[in-house]
Amino acid sequence: MPKTSFSLHAGADLAARSGMVAAASLREVAERLHTALDDVWPHTALVIFTEDCTGRPRKKAGDPEITQHVTIAEMTALRDRAAGGHWTGEAEFGGRPRLVTVLGADTGAVLVLSVPEEPADEDRVTCTRVLWSVAAACIARQVAEAAPDYLQESRAVTSERLRVTAELTDRHVTDLESLLAALRTRDLDDARARARAIDLAADALIRARSGADLVAFIAEEPVSRAFERLKSDLRPLTRYEALQIQFIEPPADGRALPGEVAHAGRAIVRSAVLLMREQEEVTRIRVQWDCDGTNLLVSVRDDGPGRMDSGLPPLRQLAARATALGGDLDLESVDNWGSRVEVRIPLDPPDTSEQPNESWGLAPREAEVLRLLTAGRRNRQIATQLGISENTVKFHTSQIYQKLGVTSRAAAAALATEAGLR
């Protein structure tokens, strides 16, 4: 890629690039950062890795021959090399050794660029760091806000990824265990070859199991660790204000929380505490998490006047977050006693083994398109998410209309919602 002239003195240009990245959705952030860095630090591919974004920990842009083959194991190894800083060198990326630059972030996320060379111009490096810090903060903010559409997509993607990963891991483990059993027999004459094959197969078996553990680690968060992060988030309120927050710890050995549930729980508690704090006469708020093995149970109670109204837009937003994950929120307010917000969020997604699309005769891909259509996605967004063309999306949409007996997106979405299709 040819070099282009670049100067950091144009502060307005850097501000414009930063604004473009900061305004990106989680789905757009990699592509926008790729565009913003195009003439700053030439690269062929860009991948962001963040464990906080459990649905899609890898966000990619650039050459699909590279990005489609980048694994979580590769990104984890590269993150360790950078150790939160900046590292450039040759490493495994996209299935083979490449020259890459790795940039860490305060949020724990990591950016990897496949580069032809590292620019000697310090302005380019500085600008890249600025834009990457904006992107990392953008991701962290949106994950922390836990908007309902993000939670729904995150749960769907996480569930599907875990299912596929479990199936692949079981298959690999079975194959490797069969290989080990065969190689350990006395029917093979070459003892050295057999020993070497056993070592290779054993290593592969360990890697397969480690990969499954890594995926599970990203997708889930121990309930005690999730609660500690919540306490850390709320600590500034007690440091500078005459407000006491009492934390009731969850069971230390409770079931791990799916990432989207942990994000939603923290976001709901933070918002509820801030709403309660705005009331007069509130001096103490009690926050409790519990986990019954099936649900995350959240309770936030204040000692205020007891006049919180469930019709307030912020409370409706909290209820929408819980509903997005199949849960519910209840508000109880009693004069001169206080207000209490109770939330239940299921740890597992709803059982979709008998979804109504079976009676419609939808093909698997048509069902995926219908789910995204029902979630409000446009054709271009559906095409991007499923890795197909917009014309293919239009074809699937026409087939869906015919099978559902409708003539519009709104009618199809309404019918799917009524039938409980998620």
Image (cartoon, rainbow, N blue to C red):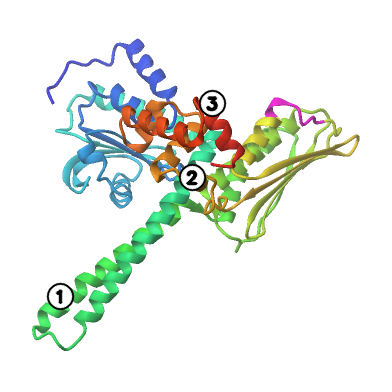
Q: Determine the secondary structure under disc 2.
A: helix
Q: Nearer the viewer, mark 3 or mark 1?
A: 3
Which label belongs to residue 410?
3
Which label belongs to residue 156?
2
Question: In the rendering, at what x and y percent does residue 8 appear?
Answer: 28, 16
Question: In the rendering, at what x and y percent does residue 384 appear?
Answer: 35, 32
Q: Which residue is mark 1?
A: 196
Q: What is the spatial separation of the Cα atoms under label 3 and label 1, in whole angstroms?
A: 61 Å
The residue located at (14%, 79%) in the rendering is: 194
Q: Amino acid at mark 3?
A: Ala
Question: In the rendering, at what x and y percent does residue 231 appear?
Answer: 62, 45
The residue located at (37%, 14%) in the rendering is: 16
The residue located at (65%, 45%) in the rendering is: 327
Q: Nearer the viewer, mark 3 or mark 2?
A: 3
Q: Residue furthest left?
A: 190
In which image quadrant can residue 233 be found?
A: top right
> Badges 3 and 1: C-beta atoms under 8 Å apart?
no
Q: Nearer the viewer, mark 1 or mark 2?
A: 2
Q: Is residue 309 magenta?
A: yes
Q: Amino acid at mark 1?
A: Arg
Question: In the rendering, at what x and y percent does residue 45 appear?
Answer: 24, 34
In which image quadrant can residue 30 be found?
A: top left
Q: What is the spatial separation of the Cα atoms under label 1 and label 2, in whole angstroms?
A: 42 Å
Please report the bounds of the magenta region as a residue range: 308-314
